[in-house]
Amino acid sequence: MEKIGREGRGRRRRSIEMEIGEDQQHDGGDQHRFEIFVRLRQMTEEDDEDESRGRRRWRCELNGDFDSSAEKEDRKGARVREGEEREGGNGDAVGVGDGQSRGIVLNFVNEQNRPLNSQNVADFLQKFNLKKASIQKALDSLADSGRISFKEYGKQKIYLARQDQFVIPNSEELTKMKEENTKLQEQLNEQRRAISEVEGEMKALQSNLTLEQILAKEANLRKEVEEMEDRLTKLRGGVTLVSPEERKAVEGMYMDTISQWRRRKRMFRDVWDAITENSPKDLKEFKEELGIEYDEDVGVSLQSFCDLMQHGKKRARGQ
């Protein structure tokens, strides 16, 4: 069929060329030339389209795909139209139409039951992927249909749920509701107090030792008691725990240490007095600046250690 179409267009092209030749000979006018040019241009476009269609068919045959290009174009156009239909409308997410948007907005306005503008509704309904334009359209539609109320304040519209759809209790019902609320509040406070008491007991129990910890502590204490009883038994039996030689050696080391301490302290006093004799600085501040500490500053006294040694000697003579 493509070959027949090309042959027919070839005959028409030749007839048009003959008309062009006759026009050049007889001067048929501008209108006749324009009609010839349009027909020739149309035939050129048809030839180009046939050529491109033939190249596509040739490539499909080489690749083993024998579907016609026309069918592919039809399927491609159908997919494009389907995508346009899905993306059409107010530009919202797929699956959310105008009716569903109005339902979502109406339910939200009724649940809130307070004055709202379009921005408030858009902020709360972001999870539904509704754009502000769609929400504004839904609000206006609901207001026009009388399903919600609205008031204009300048350029801004405030929307509110219709109050006639809600059951408004009378004074007696309100009084009963207040009494029930008071009772429920008292029950809630009692439950909270009970929870606090239980939590206090749990903390007290958690602070106590477990059975395993108690057994381990008891074993350690029993071991310490046995060791102390063994030592006391030895002392009561007159057993000498330290020999006289060891005691003499320890006392000699102790006396030597005390002597070194006394000598170094006297050397420091002499050097410190020589340095600070004519110093204009305050001695306490100067000492803190150098980081020097006396024995008394750290709670140590040389005399107390000397008295301890003298007390030991007296006790030994008394024995």
Image (cartoon, rainbow, N blue to C red):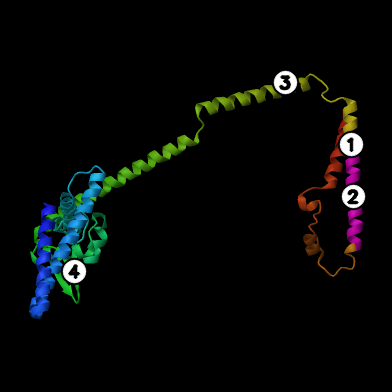
Q: Position of residue 295 (x, y in %)?
A: 81, 51
Q: Position of residue 191 (x, y in %)?
A: 31, 43
Mark 1 to mark 4: distance in Å?
98 Å
> As drawn, is 283 to the left or to the right of 168?
right
Q: Position of residue 155 (x, y in %)?
A: 20, 75
- Against 274, is 155 above or below? below
Mark 1 highlights which residue?
Answer: 253
- Which one is earlier in the sequence, the residue at label 1 or at label 4? 4
Residue type beneath disc 1: Met
Residue type beneath disc 4: Ile
Q: Tell which tag, 1 or 4, sits nearer the viewer.
A: 4
Q: Count residues near mark 2 (Cα–Cα under 10 Å), then give few for <14, some for 14-19, many for 20+.
A: few
Main secondary-structure element of the magenta-colored stretch: helix
What residue is at 70 percent from the left and 23 percent from the top? 227
- Which one is earlier in the sequence, the residue at label 4 or at label 3? 4
Mark 3 to mark 1: distance in Å?
30 Å
- Against 45, is 4 above or below? above
Report the number of discs: 4
